[in-house]
Image (cartoon, grey):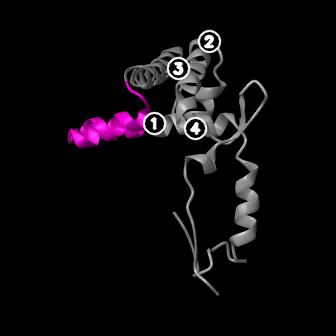
């Protein structure tokens, strides 16, 4: 059998949207990330607590002070991401800038913040149903990829 390589890029992870553009499932494309960050910030600024309870289930938030500290840390992180979005063409551009400037510490911190953003996104939305179909078609019975298939 021939070798097959699937190349998954930004378009491959673009989620399904309503007519108004709200992402129902999947992840936002790079140009939608600022709007998603603003939505998360608005949610965190509200009195809703479920998001932090989902993100930090193992963290002891036994007191009002613990809760306030966790919420403030998340607000700080998402405010930084929002600022990056306002100052740079895309978050990808900013990440590349950090790498080119050899700002390894800044890059690591940014990477952690961006990871947290994508965790929030994945918890708030359903997984893209296209992945289930894709994986069901290529995975073998032991949930491994056939030797002739690569995914980049």
Answer whether residue 105 is visible to the viewer in this image: yes
Q: Residue at x 61, y 84 (%)?
A: 2
- State which tag comes first along the sequence, 2 or 3: 2
Discs 2/3, front: 2
Residue topped by disc 3: 67
Give me the C-alpha separation between circle 4 and circle 2: 25 Å
Q: Is residue 71 left or right of residue 17?
A: left
Q: Residue 143 placed where, x, y %?
A: 67, 72
Name the mark on residue 46.
2
- State which tag comes first along the sequence, 2 or 1: 2
Furthest toward the right, the residue is: 19
Name the mark on residue 83.
none
Per the rendered image, the range of residues in magenta is 88-114
Q: Residue 6 placed where, x, y %?
A: 59, 65
Helix, strand, or loop for circle 1?
Answer: helix
- State which tag comes first along the sequence, 3 or 4: 4
Kindly check if marks 1 and 4 are in contact, taking CB atoms under 8 A apart as contact: no
Crowding near the residue tagged with mark 4, few <14, some 14–19, many ≥20 C-alpha atoms within 10 Å: some
Give me the C-alpha separation between circle 2 and circle 3: 13 Å
Crowding near the residue tagged with mark 1, few <14, some 14–19, many ≥20 C-alpha atoms within 10 Å: some
Give me the C-alpha separation between circle 3 and circle 4: 31 Å
Q: Residue 111 placed where, x, y %?
A: 39, 40
Residue topped by disc 1: 114
Helix, strand, or loop for circle 3?
Answer: helix
In terms of secondary structure, what is the magenta stretch mainly?
Answer: helix
Q: Residue at x 44, y 31 (%)?
A: 90
């Amino acid at each position: 059998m021939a070798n097959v390589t699937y190349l998954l890029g930004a378009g491959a992870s673009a989620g399904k949207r309503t007519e108004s553009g709200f992402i129902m499932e999947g992840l936002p494309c790079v140009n939608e990330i600022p709007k998603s960050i603003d939505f998360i910030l608005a949610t965190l600024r509200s009195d809703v607590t479920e998001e932090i309870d989902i993100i930090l289930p193992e963290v002891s938030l036994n007191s009002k002070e613990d809760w306030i500290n966790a919420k403030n840390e998340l607000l700080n992180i998402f405010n930084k991401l929002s600022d990056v979005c306002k100052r740079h063409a895309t978050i990808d551009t900013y990440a590349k800038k950090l790498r080119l400037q050899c700002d390894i510490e800044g890059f690591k911190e940014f990477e952690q913040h961006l990871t947290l953003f994508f965790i929030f996104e994945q918890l708030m939305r359903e997984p893209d149903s296209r992945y289930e179909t894709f994986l069901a078609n290529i995975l073998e019975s032991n949930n491994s990829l056939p030797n002739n298939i690569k995914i980049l």
